[in-house]
Amino acid sequence: MSDEENRKMANLADLRPGQTAYVQAMAGRGSLRKRLMDMGIVPGTEVTMLRRAPLGDPLELMVKGYYLSLRASEAELVKVSDTKPERRDGTVTFAIKTADKIEGEVR
């Protein structure tokens, strides 16, 4: 991912109620990362911020047709943008940031 693309991306916690974005990348490691992915937070997924609790935590999101509540600290690990990931021949290309940069495709 280029520096310009990284600057354009916000994290999931930055969305305002009613705003929709697409998951671009995820930070974090281990069980938290796996838990987020198990809940459908994967690159290419459309996510809509529904509302934020009065004190700012937790956040209520719409992901793949279901309601999901996340802590703001968890949502900060998910990078989003307002553009869908680029598609080529039915695949979604994405980048996952970890200690080692890994790139992959989902078919």
Image (cartoon, rainbow, N blue to C red):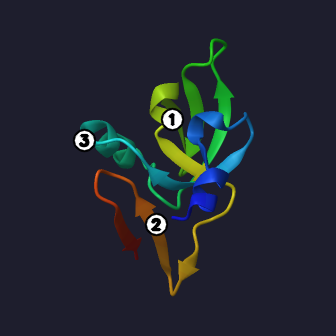
Give percent across and percent down for residue 87: 56, 78
At 56% from the left and 19% from the top, the residue drawn is: 57
Residue matched to label 1: 75
At 51% from the left and 30% from the top, the residue drawn is: 69
**Where 5 sits versus 57, above or below?**
below
Left/right of residue 24 with respect to residue 95 in the rendered view? right
Q: Which mark is residue 106?
A: none
Instruction: Give the tally of numbered discs.
Output: 3
The kind of residue tagged 2 is: Phe
The first of marks 2 and 1 along the sequence is: 1
**Where 1 sits versus 91, above or below?**
above
The kind of residue tagged 1 is: Ala
Label 1: few (<14), some or many (≥20) within 10 Å?
many
Label 2: few (<14), some or many (≥20) within 10 Å?
many
Q: Secondary structure at mark 2?
A: strand
Give percent across and percent down for residue 70: 49, 30
Give percent across and percent down for residue 84: 63, 65
Q: Secondary structure at mark 1?
A: helix
Label 3: few (<14), some or many (≥20) within 10 Å?
few
Left/right of residue 96 with respect to residue 2 in the rendered view? left
The first of marks 3 and 1 along the sequence is: 3
Which residue occupies the extreme bottom position in the image? 89
**Where 91 sits versus 77, above or below?**
below
Per the model, the C-alpha gap separating discs 2 and 3 is 19 Å
Residue 51 sits in quarter: top right
The kind of residue tagged 3 is: Gly
Which residue occupies the extreme front position in the image? 3
Residue matched to label 3: 30
The answer to whether one can see residue 107 in this image is yes
Residue matched to label 2: 94
* Quadrant (top left, top right, bottom left, bottom right) of the C terminus: bottom left
Left/right of residue 34 with respect to residue 2 in the rendered view? left
